[in-house]
């Protein structure tokens, strides 16, 4: 209950990245609900440790689909002996001989664990969002996994996921934010900021994608659209806008 409350507090206070160096082999619907709340309301990226049992299943909340799960590699670049693994492991990061804080003795120590690996990925997510704060959690995940250095078997595997995170490649792959645009034609006004689109019309209008697919009908629209070209048709007026 305390973990779930903390996740919700993070979302409500504007956190964009939530690091969870914690876990349990037992699922919790309360924690899963809190994570989904953070993604839905704050578009926060949730990242969690895979676990330190050397087991072929991930701990929770790392095992939830909405969470980026992190395993650990040792100083030789191989999977750490303690790191949990499985088909739903996303990436790995250094997790052995990591200098960290130990609050109950008020000092620094070299520690190991997937809890030590997870903050590396959370830091990368923060860097990505510092370059482009308009990215969604799924877009941040795609950049992290898509730029990871492949390890183990070719492609995604149980022991390394998509591979070892690479900060340099990830930031190169992060697109620059799209400047907001404000277009007005007759009775229709379109505001585009990244993937967020706001459309206002005096009369009912319809939104179509460039391939003719119907998207929406009404007098007001506010939401996120996939990248592409769209047309707004209201009466005799047709307005074109681009979501990048």
Image: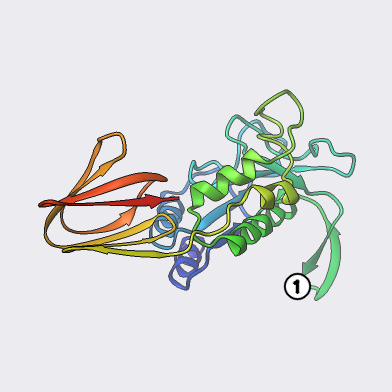
Q: Camera-side residue: 191 or 105?
A: 191
Residue 144: percent from left, percent from top: 63, 46
Seen from this angle, which residue lies furthest bottom? 106
- The image shows a total of numbered marks equal to 1
x, y percentage for residue 192? 37, 60
Q: Is residue 229 left or right of residue 142?
A: left
Residue 61 in view (yes/no): no
- Residue count near mark 1 (Cα–Cα under 10 Å), binned few <14, some 14–19, many ≥20: few
| Left or right of 164 in this view: 191 | left
Q: Residue, x 67% and y 41% (percent of image)?
A: 147
User: For residue 22, what is the image quadrant?
Assistant: bottom right
Left or right side of 106 for 212 = left
Give the color scheme: rainbow, by chain, secondary structure or one colour. Answer: rainbow
Q: Is disc 1 placed on a helix, strand or loop?
A: loop
- Which one is nearer the viewer's eye here, 188 or 169? 188
Q: Nearer the viewer, residue 59 or 146?
A: 146
Residue 233 image offset from top left, x and y in percent? 18, 49
Point 40% across, 53% down: residue: 33
Where is residue 80 shown, x and y percent of the image?
Answer: 80, 39
In the image, residue 117 sits, relative to residue 131, either above or below, namely: above
Give the vertical position of 6 relative to 155 (above or below).
Answer: below
Residue drawn where x is 46% and y is 54% of the image? 35
Q: Residue furthest top?
A: 153
Q: Residue furthest right?
A: 76
Viewer can see residue 37: yes
Tell me: 219 left or right of 97: left
Residue marked by disc 1: 104
């Amino acid at each position: 209950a305390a973990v779930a409350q903390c996740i919700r507090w993070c979302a409500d206070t504007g956190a964009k990245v939530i690091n969870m160096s914690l876990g349990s082999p037992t699922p919790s619907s309360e924690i899963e609900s809190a994570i989904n709340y953070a993604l839905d309301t704050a578009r926060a990226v949730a990242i969690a440790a895979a676990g330190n049992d050397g087991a072929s299943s991930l701990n929770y909340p790392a095992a939830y689909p909405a969470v980026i799960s992190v395993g650990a590699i040792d100083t030789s670049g191989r999977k750490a002996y303690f790191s949990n693994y499985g088909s739903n492991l996303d990436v790995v990061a250094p997790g052995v001989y990591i200098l960290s804080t130990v609050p109950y003795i008020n000092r620094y120590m070299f520690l190991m664990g997937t809890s030590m690996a997870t903050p590396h990925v959370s830091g990368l997510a923060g860097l990505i969002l510092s370059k482009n704060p308009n990215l969604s959690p799924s877009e941040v995940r795609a950049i992290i996994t898509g730029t990871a250095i492949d390890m183990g078997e070719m492609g995604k595997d149980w022991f390394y996921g998509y591979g070892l995170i690479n900060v340099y490649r990830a930031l190169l792959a992060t697109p620059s934010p799209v400047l907001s645009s404000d277009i007005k034609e007759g009775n229709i006004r379109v505001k585009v900021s990244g993937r967020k689109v706001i459309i206002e019309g005096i009369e009912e209008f319809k939104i179509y994608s460039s391939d003719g697919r119907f998207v929406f009908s009404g007098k007001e629209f506010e939401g996120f659209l996939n990248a592409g070209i769209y047309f707004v048709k209201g009466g005799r007026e047709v307005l074109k806008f681009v979501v990048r």
